[in-house]
Image (cartoon, rainbow, N blue to C red):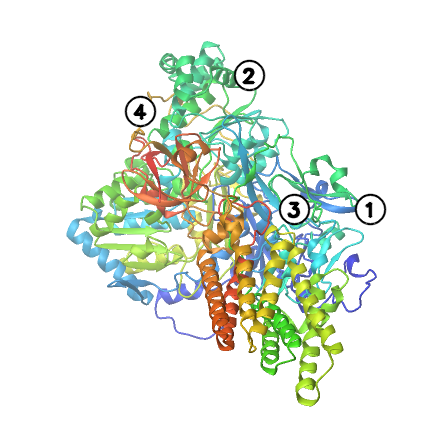
Amino acid sequence: MSPLNTKDRPYSIRRWQGPLTDELVRRPAQFGLGQLPSRLQPDATVKSVCGFCATGCSLNVHLHQGEAINLSASPQYPVNLGMACPKGWEALTPLSAPDRATMPLLRQGADLKPIEWPEALRTFCDRFKRIQEQHGKASVAFLSTGQIPCEEMAMLGAFAKFQMGVLHGDGNTRQCMATAVAAYKQSFGFDAPPYSYADFEQSDVLVFVGANPCIAHPIMWQRVMRNPRQPEIVVVDPRKTETAMAATRHLAIRPKSDLVLFYGLAHLLIEWGAVDRAFVEAHTQGFDAFAAFVRQYPLAAVAECTGLTEAQLLSLAELLASGKRVSFWWTMGVNQSYEGTRVAQSLINLALMTGNMGKPGTGANSITGQCNAMGSRLFSNTTNLLGGHDFKDADHRFKIAETLGVELDRIPTENSLAYDQILEEVEAGRIKGLWVIATNPGHSWIEQGRFRRLREQLDFLVVQDMYHSTETAQMADLVLPAAGWGEKEGTFINSERRIGVIRKTRRAPGQALSDFYIFKALSDTWDDRGLFDQWTCPEDVFQSLKALSRGQPCDITGIRDYAHLEAAGGIQWPCPEGTEPETERRLFADGAFFHADGRARFCFDPPAAIPEETDAAFPFWLLTGRGSSAQWHTQTRSAKSDVLRKLGPRELCLEICPEDAARLGIQPQERVCVRSRRGETLATAIVVPTVQPGQVFLPMHFAGTNFLTQQVVDPHSRQPSYKGCAVTIEKR
Amino acid sequence: MPNSVTVERSPIEQYLRKQQELETPVARFAQRHDAGGPAMEPYYRDLIPLTQPQPGEQYAFEVDLDACTGCKACVSACHSLNGLEDEETWRDVGLVVGGDRAAPYQQTVTTACHHCEDPGCMHGCPVLAYEKDDVTGIVRHLDDQCIGCQYCVLKCPYDVPKFSERLGIVRKCDMCHGRLAEGEAPACVQACPTQAIRISIVSKTAPQADAPANRDFLTAAPDPDYTRPTTRYVSERPIPDNVRAADAAALRPQHAHTPLVVMLTLTQAAVGLQTAAALAGHPLGVELVSALLLAAGLTASILHLGRPLGAWRAFLGLRRSWLSREIVLFGGYAPAFFGLLAVHHVFTPLPSMLWVPLTVLGWLGVASSMMIYHDTHRRFWHWPRTTLRFFGVAVTALLAGLALLPGDGVWPLLAASALVLKLAGEFAPLLSSHRSVPTRLMRGPLSGWACARALWGGAAVFTWLFAAVLASPALAAAGVGLFLAGELCERVLFFKAVDAPKMPGGFTA
């Protein structure tokens, strides 16, 4: 009883208690949760890693009779330290949405009609087999995701490639971190983000490039704010974002001048002799050629190109040369570019040449997007053979065949095509069957007008998703109803390589099945090979993944089981057998990189031409990105929460600066038409000084944006260049 | 799952069954032991006061704007840890923008109840469902006392109390008073990743003067002089003078409150007609129409309440609440009128010494209705405008009531004139160059209602003019019908076009 309720009351006719008051009355809960409403008192709790972004926060799921009734952030988990972003707090809500797919759906004319699972499984197999018989094995492909656990990714990759004989499959991770993968592979010899989140707290100079962690990764920003070293926080971004506001300096560079900026900084540092010669000589290769190359980027030219002043450039270079702990952090502003790999490597180069690698508070660090983006990099069996292996390497194929008990000749000897190439094969009529799992390319893929036309080219489109209402599910011939996060078990790997467990705390609606069971059922139906007979639960698969990782940079044979992961608060790879995992750990403390010679590479190229310059007809440069912390990608889940919907804009909003708005006569909140060479969309104009003249911004969470973007990809990573194209704005 | 014995014919049936099983993994991994006190305590220990407020002090939210970066976790955590309705949120995060090309400025602003020193909600509540705690200063809402009249929603300049259709009451932030009493931090304080929200102790007598940072409360927020909010927004970054709410230009038509539209229009018309009848020797027809309108209006007012059974408590707020006064005045007026009417026409005509006080009571009721809206401090409802509308209806109805009786046409002419003046008063601001929010709403999204209002009103005027020329009570009666239709539209606009103040919202809030 609170003291407030026991004091003298002047009016006895006032009702301080009763059924309505009881609805919200809080009383002490168990499990260290503090006070909770009476009707939400848990009888147990369980930790589960969040299923939205790659931060990998642990959520403390409150259970009543085994079922999730609420959740809060886990206090002691080393990633999030008791905090979560609004998406995490609302993680259970999207599970109860009315548009969950509860039965398999088969297209009959214009409609999707419910069917039973056996018919759905037969249809899947019959239709894809028929296509493969007519057009060859490679005429069926799959597009998967960074949203399902490692175990399910491995099953998908194994079933599709080793059983169906599919050659090409890729994931939506191509849209978010392929560039980081390509950059790390070339520079370090393995796709290995070197950092730990502790580096946010231990750095003296944090340089964020094309990253807005305040709203995109709020829990990482929490770690920055915990930094006790009074760090300089530098944000390189054309927009004055939330993070730019919170930074100590903001460099509002001209879009796509980042590569020149970082080459210019490298040049200045070399001129000043601010190079860690010992580190460069002991652990890298190619520095001299790089030093010669960056001579083409003198201060004045860099200032001219980037729109920054020479003073700004000199001051930043001094900061990098100061000998303090410098860390570089990038997100989609770098990755989603036609030359993103080289931009990422220009940051890696700066870290390498200044010796800011493998030490506390340093590194060239890619912050990625999806909850299991890292898992897909290692275990999706798409670009890499399972466990970060190489399809083209006979020894690797042999190892995988042995470990999984698969016939060697069923393992493809070539890599998958990338996402964009798969879609080009569809355009060309060579891929006729497509299977889309836990992703929504009908909204997220670049240049939607072109994507939507692909539907006509496909003989059979299967979509496996939690919801029957996504843009892509609505295009499908067959929809397989999937259980979501919270309704199944497995492991995710976060941005700092930490493996964490997700828990099953809700019953999936209707006949929705976890992807684990769907893949098992499809495998059972495809033929009697019994590919997955050895795996009766996701943890069985995890044991196989461990075996697959043996001897790799991502070796996790030292992890015993899910209980071990749980007890340790997640475990970062590598963790080979015989080692005890530490709580937080970074790579390359020994300076040993993963290339055969142990040396990191300096990779560089001159900047490429901008694919689409602005001109008189399309005078504005369109920037895209995350709009709010409450919205997740195509909003298939986040829009299912009333709270999250309240916390983001209700409709597509175009950010435009006051000068341009005045020139075009656009009033705040006015509806405008945004048009590119490829399409158009309506948006509500928001007049803000945070975007620069000649630039406009649209968030990616509404489908209209990608009708404008242009399908151009980075040549190394094949990641689409979402972050820029030319548009025009018209009043309606 | 029931342990029924079934023969499973296919793997898919097994998978479907296993998919529905929760027990095994939960039993394996659930943390069943009690971990003792609140595990979050180390994170919020420094964010709540160690002591209770002293006399003359109170608790207040303090927001470090430099640390608030727009993650909005506070909103979700408050929602989850307090068990709110699906769409109910007690906290919100808005955005202010400003600055110039050299130094663009944007700042997210987290906001909840400001636990005002002089709470508008509390002063308006007719049933004393609000209490400002003597010790903590927390403004609490007594959910079981609330009758769901939603007057507090109109009184609060920060859009804090939220009405629940399911429960029929409003609810609002209570600063997690029970948590604070036990040394736990409020949900929002616990959940902020950057520790931007804390509970501080402020002087209750004059927090503005005491805290320089709070003197202006928050640029782009409603004027703090009205309720004296206690939340402090602090920032070491200079805030540009030109900042405005990101949704400042957004037009937000407000709720129409249909029962109130009906109640206000009909009670005012009824008082006017009743007065006309009293002046004209109590013609039964006019008096009956008046009584019927009054009955219909008061019935409608009950429909407005989320919990009408508690309405009898409405006298409790008489000392402070104009709504309480209105309820008591009309609550006395209606039965008195019906009683006098019955006695006068069934038994014996009553002397005017009984009718005069009744009539005065009716006009006082209309005055209290006017004060209810004036007292919200909303510009569109400031007394001159509300008087024009509310007394305008009553006076026009009075004149129209006299026009219903056989006569020489002067009354319909006067009724038409009164309505013309009222229409002119309503529409004049629309012609001004100043584009206020109500004007922009009425010229924009509410233009349909504005046209309807003008057309019905114009039709009534012309009908009464014909009635004057032809000296036709029947035409005058038809005019009354058109008039009432027009006034109902006017009252819809009165509610929908109001400039409702609130804290800064997001882009399209």
Which element is circle 2 on?
A: loop
Q: Residue furthest left?
A: A134
Judge from the rendering whether residue B249 lies leftward or rightward of residue A524; answer left or right: right
Q: Which label was assigned to residue B198? A: none
Give the CA separation, mark 2 to mark 1: 52 Å
Which element is circle 4 on?
A: loop
In the rendered image, residues at marks 4 and 3 fall on the same chain: no
> What x and y, as percent, mark residue A705?
36, 43
Which element is circle 3 on?
A: helix
Q: Which amino acid, mark 3?
A: Gln
Q: Nearer the viewer, residue B455 or B410?
A: B410
| Residue at which label 2 appears | A322
Judge from the rendering whether residue B489 lies leftward or rightward of residue B124; answer left or right: left
Give the position of the C terminus of chain A as an image quadrant: top left
Circle nearer the viewer, 4 or 2: 4
| Residue at which label 1 appears | B56
Which of the chains bears the disc numbered 4? A
Classify 10 Å Cα crowding around label 2: few (below 14), some (14-19), many (20 and above).
few
Q: Which amino acid, mark 1?
A: Gly
| Residue at which label 4 appears | A608
Q: Earlier in the sequence, mark 4 or mark 2?
A: 2
